[in-house]
Amino acid sequence: MNASGPKCGSLDELKKLAKSDVGAIVTKSISLEPRKGNEIPRAHYDEIGSLNSLGIPNLGIEQVAKDISAIKKETSKPIVANIAGFSVDDFKKLALAANSSEADMIEANLSCPNIIGHPQTAYDTKSTKELAEFFKDNVSLPLSIKLPVYLSQHQKNEVLELIVKNKVKMVTLINTVGDSLMINPKMEMAVMKPKKGVGGLGGRYIKPIALGAVWTFYNYFKENKYDCKIIGVGGIYNGTDAFEFFLAGANAVQIGSAYYRTDETIFTNVKNELDKILEKKGYKSLQKITGKLKTF
Ligand code: DHB
């Protein structure tokens, strides 16, 4: 899949994805109302990765639902509606609206780091639990919750427990790492304007962090005999990167920063490179390697 964020907000961008080799199309995070997003400069991309603080610019759920209907006429690829609320109540409304749209799946973005005054929902275990329960009882489409990295073991365990208790069937790991800062030393200045320069870090900068999250979640689910699928994201630029995510326990992967820096051919290239790796190593399917990482 493409990762929610780069080049997936307008109907034209969705159409480009529909024509590509991407396996499923993910929308830019959708809010209840249309939003212009944060002030510019609000994104910085380099050869290693990205820093962004876009502030969820999007057309709002009403328009995006129409765009999803339009795109469904052009492609048989599954469409994933990525929803982003600014409160528990927003998330409930968005989930119901997305559930009755023509989307095939919902990704609930509980982890956007860039909205002033609205910290990541997924760092609030109580709200996350309430939403997981709500989704279980009210959403019929497959739903993944998109989470941030948990640096606190204590909170990670709380979240893992609530995932199992509330029968969350899918998680997307991980969102950009919030409160990151990049500096232009010549100008002695932050590279972005919003939030005094801090925003979400993505791309190769976070690959080991994302892999660690996928691997620890995978092991927890395995030890607890619980079937929760994992979508891995963070620093996938080539077939080897994707291969590593599958070894660590991902069932699917998303490509964000690398797509921003290139074009639709990234999906073809990663897929072909991954196929070649599997063939060379004699693996008949991705399932054969999922979670099969060796450790000492
Ligand atoms: C934005 C950034 C994110 O990392 C995210 O998950 C959702 C939205 C943004 O700033 O638009």
Image (spheres, rainbow, N blue to C red):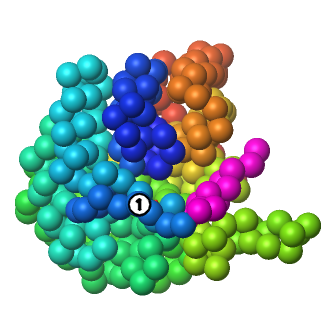
> In this image, 269 relative to 3: left or right?
right
Q: Position of residue 45 (x, y in %)?
A: 69, 50
Q: Which residue is label 1 attached to? A: 36
Neighbourhood count class around disc 1 (C-alpha, 10 Å): few under 14, some 14–19, many 20 upward: few
Q: Position of residue 34 (x, y in %)?
A: 29, 58
- Screen quadrant of the C terminus: bottom right
Q: Is the residue 284 above or below the residue 263 in the image?
A: above
Residue type indicated by callout 1: Lys
Q: Is residue 171 magenta?
A: no
Magenta residues, as a range? 40-53
Q: Image quarter for residue 280?
A: top right
Q: Is residue 44 magenta?
A: yes
Q: Is the residue 263 above or below the residue 132 in the image?
A: above
Q: Position of residue 84 (x, y in %)?
A: 32, 62
Q: Position of residue 257 (x, y in %)?
A: 60, 45
Say which residue appears at 28% left-offset and 36% top-offset. 79
Q: Is residue 254 visible?
A: no
Say which residue appears at 39% left-offset and 80% top-offset. 118
